[in-house]
Image: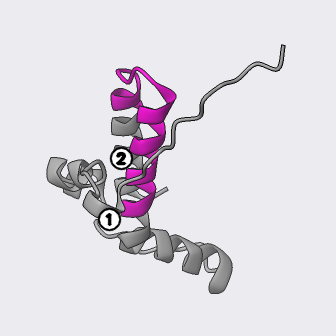
Amino acid sequence: MSPTSLKVTQEGIRRGAGLSSIGEALKMEYRMSQAFMRNHDFYEGIRAVLVDKDQSPKWKPDSLEDVTDDIVASYFEDLGENELVLESVKKTSNL
């Protein structure tokens, strides 16, 4: 697992513990997924495991010490017009 993934996952668990609804959790996870898709490491992991099969990913950054708090925070930023919007579902009874 990439150093960035480790730190972002740890922060996601920490933040997730304080969320009050499944909707908030889904929005946070969506933000994280979109940030991972913009990041080098996602594609590098695919290359190392599935494409070249060399099992030697070259992570950027390549150490936990080099993954800054700003890098981690960027995975949780609002996505603006691309933010996940959850529709309200009205529960009805057939009884």
Compute the Cα span from label 1 to label 2.
14 Å
Q: Which residue occupies the extreme right position in the image? A: 95
On screen, residue 54 versus residue 37, left or right, reads: right
Magenta segment: does it hold 57?
A: no
Structure colour scheme: one colour
Q: Quadrant of residue 46?
A: bottom right
On screen, residue 58 versus residue 55, left or right, reads: left
Badges 1 and 2: C-beta atoms under 8 Å apart?
A: no
Q: Which mark is residue 6?
A: none
Q: Secondary structure at mark 2?
A: helix
Q: Main SS of the magenta segment?
A: helix
Residue at x 41% of width, y 75% of height? 58
Q: Which residues are magenta?
A: 13-35
Which x, y percent locates residue 47? 56, 80
Earlier sequence position, callout 1 versus callout 2 = 2
Q: Which residue is mark 2?
A: 8
- Dot 2 amino acid type: Val
Which x, y percent locates residue 20? 40, 20
Q: Which residue is mark 1?
A: 62
Residue 84, relative to residue 25: is it above or below? below
Q: Which residue occupies the extreme bottom position in the image? A: 52
